[in-house]
Amino acid sequence: MSIASMTGFARIEGAHSGWTWAWEARSVNGRGLDVRLRIPNGFETLEGKVRAAAKAALRRGNVQISLQYQRENKSNDLVVHEDTARALVLALQPLVDEGLARPARVDGLLGVRGILDTPRIGDNPDDLAAIEAAMAAGIAPLMAAMSVARNTEGAETASVLEAALDEIETLVAKARTCDGAQAAAIKARLHEQITALLDGQGFDADRLAQEAALMAVKADVREELDRLDAHITAGRALLGQSEPVGRKLEFLAQEFNREANTLCSKSSDMVLTDIGLALKTRIDQVREQAANVE
């Protein structure tokens, strides 16, 4: 199983009792798991179910989940509140009897707010309970679809990371063959520099050899190259895990960068320095991609 991304989108639609709705979930990078909901009034009981499902399916990411609904056939969505209309007519009748108002007409009544209305999802309590249950049944498929989307994105991210690790491995192998990485070459170069510096002056040859050897050890980058190889192996192992490894990959990218920085600081050879800079470029790519891994 490949790694999962923190980026994903999912949408689930449903219908019941003349109403249609849609669940939507979007997720982006996040340090932890932050779930934010946009659920219409009257359906607050769904919030706990959504949060529980999100926490069970996801480990990291900023996740936004919304629910929208509407009447299935809008063209016939008209309800006349007859009781309200009758009550209004009766209330106005004394004014009509006194000649202060004209008798109520249908067109006038329909213009009064509250007489003509559209159906609301809570008008029938039995329907409301059934609709809410049907909406709740869509939560699990929504989370499953989100997981699929994040896994698909994660597979693409894994391919990019694998390619970056391959390039880092090639650069490390190239650095090992570079003259600037050879202890003997480093020692000879330091001996030449010190000899030139002390030209014409008396000095202890044995002491000079000891100092040159010590400086050569400090300039030796083989340990950094060994650790880079170890990090490459660790990175490939992480890419094969099914558990969330985003934080581990981010830490590993920091370790990669530390070794590359040390290599560049130790290098006094242009070719080796160029390799170190190329390593830093590839490591930046690893860091950027790791930030999107769950």
Image: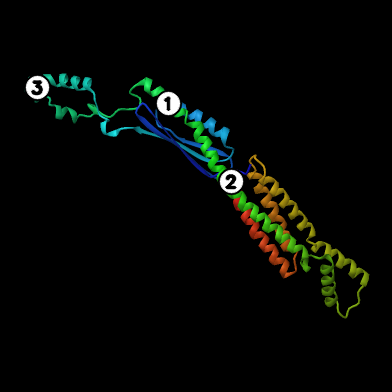
Q: Viewed as shown, does residue 119 lie left or right of 105?
A: right
55 shown above or below 220: above
Tag 3 and tag 1, C-beta contact below 8 Å? no
Residue at mark 2: 154
In what quadrant of the picture does the N terminus appear?
top right
Residue at mark 3: 96
62 shown above or below 52: below
Q: Viewed as shown, does residue 103 lie left or right of 183?
A: left
Residue at mark 1: 132
Residue under the point 14% across and 27% down = 106
In depth, the one of 60 and 164 nearer the eye is 164
Mark in the foreground, 3 or 1: 1
In what quadrant of the picture does the C terminus appear?
top right
- Report, in whole angstroms, how far the alpha carbon at label 3 lies from the one at label 1: 47 Å
Residue under the point 60% across and 51% down = 289
Q: How crowded is mark 3: few (under 14 residues within 10 Å), some or many (20 or more)?
A: some
**Which residue, as the protein is rendered here, is positioned at the far left?**
99
234 shown above or below 37: below
Q: Which of marks 2 and 3 is nearer the N terminus?
A: 3
Q: Viewed as shown, does residue 18 lie left or right of 143?
A: left
